[in-house]
Image: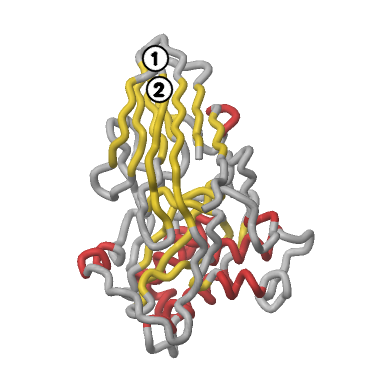
Amino acid sequence: VTTRVDLLDPVGATRIWLPVPSLNTDWQRSLESSYNSNGKSQIGSDGVEGARMLFTEFADGVKPFVEITSRVQTQSRAPLAQGQAAAPSEDAATLQYFTRPTHLLPTDGIVRTTAQKAIQGATTDLEKVRAIYDWVVANSWREPKVRGCGEGDIKTMLETGNLGGKCADINALFVGLCRSVGIPARDVYGLRLAPSEFGYKELSGNPASLKGAQHCRAEAYVKGQGWMAMDPADVAKVMRLETSEWLKTTDHPIVKPVYNTLFGGWEGNWMAYNTAHDLTLPQSKGDRIGFFMYPTAENDEGRFDSYAPDDFKYQITAKEIKA
């Protein structure tokens, strides 16, 4: 996966941060990265959330470019099969960490009240996660007018009743509701890389041009199951955009296979960068960011618009190497 940034009209000194795949799990291996630039570059971490990044500084008068290529092994995920051995337990401190509130993911007030209503009648954690997944699919919707991947401000979404958004909104809603009732959950921020085996255009990436292919998913932890793959946002995307008609039921033959699979599974045509929320970029003069899956840059006039790749001038491509 190659990301290239060219800033054509720099003003003063410039700083660029590019996400680097950080996760090593049973479904992804983040391998080596190499880079090239006319600035001063180093690969590091935010130091808190474990999000790896390439940070590059450019002096005044330099027309910046930076390119990074990362190798990643991915595979599809499926729910734990009947009779399969239980997943190993997760570290208790890690589970506690992924129940914490953050700036954009509060776990009290309307968030907790909403979750408690959604899980009424559920007794096990698996039943509660299923109830929250179903509630999010039933009550949120894909809103194409939202820029980029959205912002993930779940308190405002619930207070206004406007549950329309994109992946960073809808999956953050799922994560926040889970955390508010004590179920460890996290967003996983990444990038679609290749066509979907579902055959659905909306779940595919075009490896020749991946700008705009950023997509976050979610995980919830259930004892015995381990970290379970979740993506209610992609269910909403198929319902709203896969056909010319807005499909309103999960029983529709186009929606049903996605609705069933994305509770516990997801396709390996996607890679993860990190699980970082409310991130402070090292040496940034700007505000913290809600998540980090887009190239980010600043100069003396402020931060560039990561949601405008043609103005910002970045391009992302991928090449598949079959195992």
Labels 2 and 1 touching (C-beta < 8 A): yes
Tally of numbered tags: 2
Q: Which residue is mark 2?
A: 299
Of callouts 2 and 1, which one flags the residue occurring earlier in the amino acid sequence?
A: 1
Tag 2: amino acid: Asn
Up-down relation of residue 303 to residue 217 (above or below): above
* Residue 6 vertical placement versus 225 (above, below): above
Direction top: furthest residue: 61
Question: Residue 78 in the image: x percent, y percent?
Answer: 50, 71
Residue shown at 36% from the left, 53% from the top = 23
Q: Quadrant of residue 95?
A: bottom left
Three-letter amino acid code at disc 1?
Gly
Label 2 Cα neighbours within 10 Å, binned few <14 / some 14-19 / many ≥20: some
Q: Position of residue 11 (x, y in %)?
A: 44, 15
Q: Secondary structure at mark 1?
A: loop
> In the rendered image, which residue does mark 1 sit on?
12
